[in-house]
Amino acid sequence: MVNLQKPFTYNFMSAFIAVMILCLSIYPQKFKANPPSPAAFNACWFYPTSIKGGVNIASDNIGALYLPLTDGKLLSINSITAEKTWETSLIGDIISVPLIDQENVYIVTKNSGKLKSENDIEPGFAVLHSLGKNTGITRWLLKFSSSEEVHLYNSENFIVLIIANGDVYSISKADGQINWKKTLGSAISSPPLKKTNEIILSTFDKRITALSLNSGEPVARFITPEPPTIVIEDTTGNNFVVGDKKGNLWSLNKKKKTPNWSFRLGGEISNVKLTTRGLLASSLDNFVYLISEKSGKLIWKKRLTGRIAAEPQIQDNNFIITSIDESEALVIQLSSGRLVTKIFLEDEDFFTGESLQSKNLFIYTTRKGIFSFSLREEGCKMPEKM
């Protein structure tokens, strides 16, 4: 008896394989993956500590990091080895990012809710501290009326102190004396933008105001459809790039005070960054977008698993981005939005706050402390002891 099952199976399989080869040759994009080559990644160090929530760490870009701690202490460590340089206890709770110049560190504290001692800050007041950068020793203190979020900006001979309620101060670095004070009349709606001679402030009354750093007087005003959540300058310096809570992103011509283009994202815009490829915009819809700076057209967009935790950090043709309460950082190709590689934290640790780039190091706050890594072979070394 002739076995017909074997030749039938053989012929069927041969035909099936031929069809699959034909499909792959006609539609290769559906069946073939083209993953980018992974970037070099080196874990540098981990410093276990408790960082003050909502306040970022700072770097002098020379070799020191300044860490605001939860108990009102300010800690300085070496950015390459993570070795402790000094630690100082401040009056009250830290409410500002440390500001660093060539010689000093400036930081603001407020009352924590209860008077711990006769030297504590009265409720409704805050204190600006000037400390030696290399020692942490106090040079002078300035007490002022505020218990809200504070931004500090550096100028050659003075500090610009901006309170969330719209009060702006110019303060002498030499002795802490107030040079001038300006009240905007509305609360600040986005992080201020500092230029050489001006500070650009956005407020909830739908205005962008440019103040002179020398006098505090307005030098330009712009009306916006919504209160801005982010304002930056484009690469030409002739336009503002503005984002708002409704997800609108637009280019605003400074001279004409009219929009050049607009683009709608899926949620409130939390950050916009200039890159060589376009505008890298983060939104509270858990997407990151790359948008043409000239036309406002979408180049690509990518969804993250959770709420974006920090400002994206860029190196070469890649950027690094994290999500709140996630244990992985994504390294993404800037030109295409493709995933290059992932950087994982240890078990039961996750990203919590802002990020910082210091030379070749990328530094992130986590639930357990500070995590540092590099995408290049050089740039960090592990200390012998932690």
Image: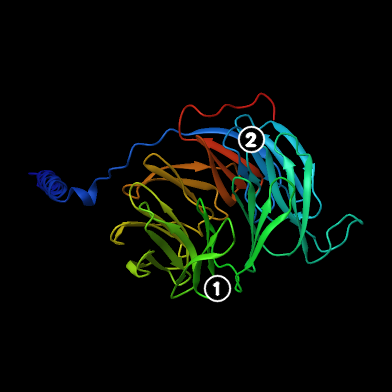
Compared with residue 161, is residue 189 higher up or lower down, i.e. above or below? below
Helix, strand or loop for disc 1? loop
Q: Position of residue 372 (x, y in %)?
A: 57, 38
The answer to which of 285 and 131 lies nearer the viewer is 131
The mark lying in front, picked from 2 and 1, is: 1
Front in this rendered view, residue 333 or 195: 195
Q: Position of residue 95 (x, y in %)?
A: 70, 56
Vertical placement of residue 48 versus 247, above or below: above
Using the image, tell me which numbered label, if any, was put on residue 318: none
- Is 159 left, or right, of 125 in this rendering? left
Which of the two discs, 2 and 1, labels the residue nearer the N terminus?
A: 2
Picture quadrant of residue 43? top right
Q: Amino acid at mark 2?
A: Ala
Residue 238 quadrant: bottom left
Badge 2 is on which residue? 64
Q: Which residue is mark 1?
A: 204
Image quarter of residue 117 = bottom right
Q: Amino acid at mark 1?
A: Phe
Which quadrant does the C terminus fall into? top right
Q: Is residue 98 left or right of residue 322?
A: right
